[in-house]
């Protein structure tokens, strides 16, 4: 649905490169907290360090990164916060959301509830007139957006900017951007299957194949009023926004993912946050040293989860830790620990952990994780087995892949008991094959021809220098759905076969009639 203005974008990008080949103005947009923000912060820093002028447009508020102190930023930042009443309501929603996740009820409806929150936020984002006017006057050359919140697409459209889309999760949006998804060996997003499926599993996978498509349609209906209000002339759809991206970057790697078909406008550069470890602080080193040969494990259920609101789950985990020989460093907000629960003697609580540095420590034995891609990629980078507690979204599929690669196991939160949780830890730590598999995946990740930061910079600069990503997009983006799936060809061939069969039947009937007539004449 590109108009005249959109047609000028490739030309403007190319002219810009000729006039200013050393650096361009890049706007990064992130309306999410937690690992989504940390990833976009890395993206912004890398591009800034490579000679580009970067500004991040972000929303801030309570719960962005609980326990984490934002370091000074080398790039410019434009931010705003929602009003106190909204923040209070959002905090209540987040508490209920956590209760649902820790109870094992994090299905599609929870995802849609999150989208409903985003839709309300987007109404505010789109009305930040002063900020949007300022960003428009700055004349940025391209935007790089975190796509989990669809509103980032709308902001780019409002500013008239071409954009590169970064997916911080798995291939959930693969259906929308036209990636081939053969259900015979590519697991559907909500299926939690592997690439090696039995007949019944392939039957299930085929049934769930259209799940992401239906979710996209529901999302689109939720944001319909915003689209109609702010884009009354072009009336774009969410599907249009997905396909208008100059490039799609997925925060994953095939050391974790199953091999699958991609398109030229899709690149996987997982591992931006996985780096060589720095030494830990002396007090942590002293705590780890007390573990002797048993080593230690790290427990972190995501950058946004600083505590566990479900007390029975907390007690089961704490009891399990008390029955293992390893030391435990648990990322947990100390002020929210229940006073009537005695902390296991081998556990140390920390409001925030430098997870990458801990995973690079020689005495690390295991990562207990929610299954986010940033955490799993760091575990792969350092060759550390994982025990997953999937909570939401892509966590289940990510951990299913980790289990399939024999790098770890996972237990849904509603199934955790002290005994089975402690047994799972002992099994993974004691079975050397998990460590061997983790080291194999580490070799795959680390031996890539180009590190992820170089890939990021190279692809962004390629899009700028080539005047956009049109040359990477398949023609299928312009085809109607019936042509794309060859339904017109199938219909034509079917019609031809029907006509041929019709005439064959007619000829056979005529021959039978003639033969029977001749027989009757002879008998007479």
Image (cartoon, rainbow, N blue to C red):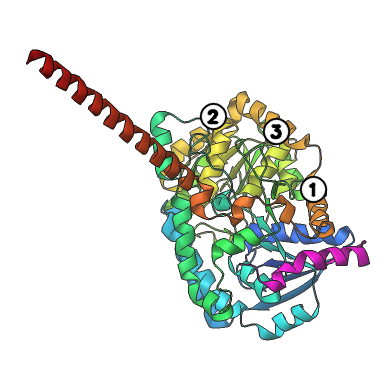
Residue at x 43% of width, y 54% of height: 107
Whether residues under marks 2 and 3 lie with C-beta atoms below 8 angstroms apart, the answer is: no
- Horizontal side, residue 268 vs residue 151: left or right: right
Q: What residue would you read off at disc 3? A: 292
361 up-or-down from 134: above or below? above
N-terminal of the two: label 2 or label 3? 3
Tell which of 298 and 10 is nearer to you: 10
Helix, strand or loop for disc 2: helix
Residue 100: x and y in percent read 43, 58
481 up-or-down from 360: above or below? below
CA–CA distance in space, label 1 to label 2: 37 Å
Residue at x 75% of width, y 78% of height: 135
Q: The magenta stretch spans which residues? A: 1-27
- Mark on residue 427? 2
- Mark on residue 347? none
Judge whether residue 388 can be spotted in this image.
Answer: no
| Image quarter of the C terminus | top left
For discs 1 and 3, the disc positioned in front in the rendered view: 1
Tell which of 186 and 68 is nearer to you: 186
| Image quarter of the N terminus | bottom right
Q: What residue would you read off at disc 1? A: 455
For discs 2 and 3, the disc positioned in front in the rendered view: 2
């Amino acid at each position: 649905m590109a108009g005249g203005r959109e047609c000028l974008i490739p030309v403007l990008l190319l002219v810009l490169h000729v006039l200013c080949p050393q650096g361009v103005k890049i706007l990064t947009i992130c309306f999410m907290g937690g690992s989504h923000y940390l990833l976009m912060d890395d993206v912004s820093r890398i591009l800034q360090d490579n000679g580009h002028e970067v500004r991040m447009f972000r929303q801030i508020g309570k719960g962005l990164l609980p326990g984490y102190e934002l370091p000074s930023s080398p790039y410019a930042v434009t931010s705003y916060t929602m009003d106190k009443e909204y923040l209070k309501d959002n905090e209540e929603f987040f508490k209920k959301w956590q209760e649902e996740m820790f109870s094992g009820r994090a299905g599609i409806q929870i995802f849609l509830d999150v989208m409903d929150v985003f839709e309300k936020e987007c109404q505010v984002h789109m009305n930040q007139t002063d900020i949007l006017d300022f960003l428009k006057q700055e004349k940025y050359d391209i935007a790089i957006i975190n796509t989990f919140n669809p509103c980032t697409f709308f902001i780019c459209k409002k500013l008239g900017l071409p954009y590169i889309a970064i997916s911080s999760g798995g291939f959930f949006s693969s259906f929308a951007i036209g990636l081939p998804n053969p259900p015979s060996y590519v697991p559907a997003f909500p299926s939690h299957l592997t690439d090696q499926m039995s007949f019944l599993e392939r039957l299930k996978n085929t049934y769930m194949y259209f799940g992401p498509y239906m979710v996209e349609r529901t999302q689109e209906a939720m944001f319909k009023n915003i689209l109609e209000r702010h884009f009354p002339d072009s009336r774009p759809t969410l599907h249009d926004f997905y396909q208008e991206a100059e490039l799609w970057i997925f925060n994953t790697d095939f050391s974790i993912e199953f091999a699958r078909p991609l398109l030229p406008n899709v690149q996987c550069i997982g591992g931006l946050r996985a780096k060589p470890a720095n030494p830990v602080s002396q007090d942590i080193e002293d705590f780890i040293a007390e573990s002797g040969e048993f080593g230690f494990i790290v427990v972190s259920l995501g950058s946004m989860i600083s505590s566990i609101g479900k007390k029975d789950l907390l007690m089961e985990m704490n009891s399990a830790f008390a029955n293992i020989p390893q030391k435990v460093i648990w990322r947990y907000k100390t002020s929210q620990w229940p006073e009537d629960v005695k902390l296991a003697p081998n556990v140390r609580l920390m409001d925030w952990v430098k997870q990458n540095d801990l995973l690079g420590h020689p005495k690390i034995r295991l990562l207990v994780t929610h299954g986010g891609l940033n955490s799993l990629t760091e575990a792969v980078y350092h060759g550390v087995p994982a025990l997953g507690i999937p909570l939401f979204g892509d966590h289940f599929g990510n951990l299913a892949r980790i289990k399939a690669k024999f790098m770890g196991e996972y237990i849904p939160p509603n199934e955790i008991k002290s005994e089975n949780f402690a047994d799972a830890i002992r099994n993974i730590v004691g079975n050397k094959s998990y460590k061997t598999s983790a080291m194999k995946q580490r070799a795959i990740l680390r031996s890539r021809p180009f590190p992820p930061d170089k890939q990021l910079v190279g692809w962004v600069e390629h899009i700028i220098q080539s005047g956009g990503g049109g040359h990477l997009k398949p023609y299928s983006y312009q085809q109607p759905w019936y042509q794309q799936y060859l339904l017109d060809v199938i219909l034509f061939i079917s019609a031809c076969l029907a006509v041929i069969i019709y005439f064959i039947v007619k000829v056979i009937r005529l021959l039978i009639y003639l033969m029977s007539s001749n027989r009757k004449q002879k008998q007479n």
